[in-house]
Amino acid sequence: MKLIMAIIKPFKLDDVREALTPLGVQGLTVTEVKGFGRQKGQTEIYRGAEYHVSFLPKIKVEVVVADDLADQVIEAIAKAAHTGKIGDGKVFVMDIERAMRIRTGETDGEAL
């Protein structure tokens, strides 16, 4: 099993969710986060005053899938989140050693 974690622009969340549904992804976790990458934040103007925003709003999407589905999910996220502009985000992939559905006690693949 793989944990796929993607940091994306907030307005791309619906596109990513819609791209994952046809692949059979049955659940995901979404968190509102803030951060910066190479862009190092941005300068904004508010009421005529210029100020620097160090941390930009982002969305973290986490989904655990079977190993054989991981490449398709990564590709779908990357395609759906792509704008071609700086700050599109990143995708991280980690191995999951074990999973358990608390309600039923199912483990590993059945728990997904």
Image: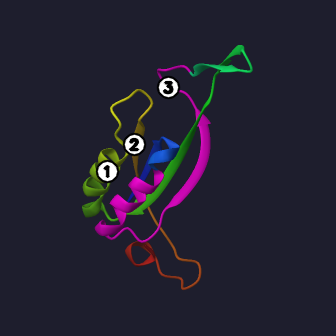
Task: Name the residue beneath numbered marker 3.
Answer: 37
Q: Secondary structure at mark 1?
A: helix
Quadrant of the rendered image containing residue 86: top left
Q: Nearer the viewer, residue 110 or 52?
A: 52
Residue denoted by label 1:
74
Q: Are marks 1 and 2 in contact (CB under 8 Å)?
A: yes
Q: Residue at x 33, y 71 (%)?
A: 24
What mark, if any, has residue 89 been given in the picture? none
Image coordinates for residue 66, horizontal then vertical, percent: 33, 65
Classify mark 3: helix, strand or loop: loop
- What whole-number distance in Å separates the C-alpha atoms at marks 1 and 3? 20 Å
Amino acid type of disc 2?
Answer: Val
Amino acid, disc 1: Ile
Residue 36, horizontal then vertical, whole percent: 55, 27
Which portion, as a residue range, is magenta?
A: 13-40
- Residue displayed at 37% across by 67% down: 25
Which quadrant holds the C terminus? bottom left
Any magenta on residue 33?
A: yes
The answer to whether residue 66 is left or right of residue 58 is left
Image quadrant occupied by the N terminus: bottom left
Residue 14, how many percent across, how many down? 45, 56
The residue at 34%/49% (across/down) is 80
Query: Where is residue 7 shown, x and y percent of the image?
Result: 48, 42
User: What's the CA distance linking mark 2 and mark 3?
Assistant: 13 Å
State if disc 3 and disc 1 touch (CB < 8 Å): no
Q: Which residue is mark 2?
A: 91
Of the residues shown, which amino acid type is indicated by label 3? Gly
Where, by quadrant of the figure, is residue 23 drawn? bottom left
Q: State the residue at coordinates (46%, 42%).
A: 8
